[in-house]
Image: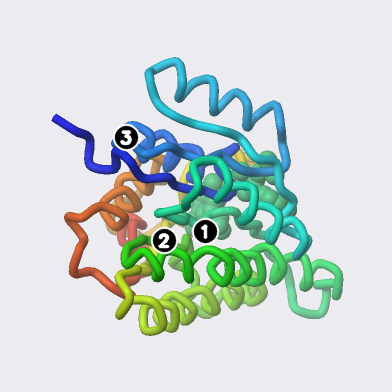
């Protein structure tokens, strides 16, 4: 049987770690040629080697999405690997928490450059080509915290709230030409990024949630895999919470 994504090429940003890496593994497992990206060459090459070792197709392109030039160059280089990008996962993201008065202008710009501007530039560079071909799928990785007022998460939450609206705007813009754009909003998930927040930090977000536990990256990746597959052919502009019920209560 041919795997569901055979013949397609997927660019997953931030796939040297955590949710992005699990997503790359999942899409490669479904037959996609995956483009791994991030700043860290060693982690990127390790991800590529692991996918190739089990018969998958993968390449690594280093990119710093803090810079507009990094996003533009990633789009160009990624499209050159097989000649097309059919699937774009805007996963690379940073999260930090703090009071509004303490956030520096530099930290503000960093958050918005990586979490909002880079996806915006990547969609602008890649979605028109998908639309010209009449097919494509984009998934933006957001967060459940966008639906809550959290005293220390205004900056991070607002950057992802922007992505939530952009998903709907892009669904309206590109959907009529065959490109489906959706959001996945993870809840607290074990990743190298959240482990670095310190002991007990990620667990603290699960208190009172229906699942009462932290998620694993593969649980987020399987939702992304569904949304980019033909099984989600009628799903446009949706925001799928994969969060153990974090946003529901
Ligand atoms: P992570 O383990 O910290 O990994 C972040 C990824 O983003 C890495 O691959 C990193 O690659 C890349 N990245 C960071 N800064 C970059 C830059 N300047 N240029 C290019 N790539 C950059 O993160 P994660 O926990 O898996 O989170 C992934 C996404 O899920 C984020 O958008 C996050 O906001 C969202 N999310 C996570 C959780 C959670 O609990 N984990 C919950 C809700 C939403 P390099 O280090 O190689 O550059």
Viewer-side label of 3, 2: 3
Q: Is residue 138 visible?
A: yes
Of the numbered discs 1 and 2, the one sitting upstream in the chain is 1
Q: Is residue 83 left or right of residue 236?
A: right
Residue 62 position in % (x across, y down): 70, 41
Name the residue: 31% across, 61% down: 245
Q: Nearer the viewer, residue 241 or 2?
A: 2
Q: Is residue 89 left or right of residue 193?
A: left
Residue 101 position in % (x across, y down): 81, 79
Residue at mark 1: C-beta within 8 A of ligand 1: yes
Q: Which residue is mark 1?
A: 90
Quadrant of the rendered image containing residue 170: bottom left
Q: Nearer the viewer, residue 171 or 91?
A: 171
Quadrant of the rendered image containing residue 238: bottom left
Q: Are circles 1 and 2 on residues that touch, CB within 8 Å?
A: yes
Name the residue: 64% across, 59% down: 95
Name the residue: 37% across, 69% down: 181
Q: Is residue 91 above or below residue 135?
A: above
Q: Crowdedness of circle 2 by 10 Å Cα count: few (<14), some, many (20+)?
A: many
Residue 31 badge: 3
Residue 1 position in % (x across, y down): 13, 29
Of the numbered discs 3 and 2, the one sitting upstream in the chain is 3
Q: Crowdedness of circle 1 by 10 Å Cα count: few (<14), some, many (20+)?
A: many
Q: Is residue 200 visible?
A: no
* Local secondary structure at mark 2: strand
Q: State the separation of the CA atoms marked 1 and 2.
A: 6 Å
Q: Crowdedness of circle 3 by 10 Å Cα count: few (<14), some, many (20+)?
A: many
Q: State the separation of the CA atoms marked 3 and 1.
A: 19 Å
């Amino acid at each position: 049987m041919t795997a569901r994504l055979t013949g397609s090429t997927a660019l997953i940003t931030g796939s040297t770690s955590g949710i992005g890496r699990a997503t790359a593994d999942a899409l490669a497992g479904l037959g996609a040629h995956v483009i791994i990206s991030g700043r860290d060459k060693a982690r990127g090459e390790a991800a590529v080697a692991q996918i190739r070792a089990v018969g998958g197709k993968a390449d690594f392109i280093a990119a710093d999405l803090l810079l507009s030039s990094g996003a533009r160059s990633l789009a160009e280089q990624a499209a050159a690997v097989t000649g097309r990008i059919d699937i774009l996962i805007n996963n690379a993201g940073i999260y930090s928490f703090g009071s509004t008065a303490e956030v520096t202008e530099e930290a503000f710009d960093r958050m918005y450059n990586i979490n909002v501007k880079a996806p915006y530039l990547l969609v602008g560079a890649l979605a028109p080509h998908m639309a010209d071909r009449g097919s494509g799928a984009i998934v933006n990785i957001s967060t459940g915290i966008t639906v809550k007022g959290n005293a220390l998460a205004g900056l991070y939450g607002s950057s992802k709230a922007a992505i939530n609206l952009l998903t709907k705007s892009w669904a309206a813009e590109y959907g009529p030409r065959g490109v489906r754009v959706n959001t996945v909003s993870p809840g607290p998930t074990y990743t190298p990024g959240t482990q670095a927040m310190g002991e007990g930090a990620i667990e603290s977000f699960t208190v009172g949630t229906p699942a009462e536990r932290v998620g694993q990256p593969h649980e987020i990746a399987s939702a992304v895999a569904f949304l980019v597959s033909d099984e989600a052919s009628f799903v446009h502009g949706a925001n799928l919470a994969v969060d153990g019920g974090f946003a529901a209560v």
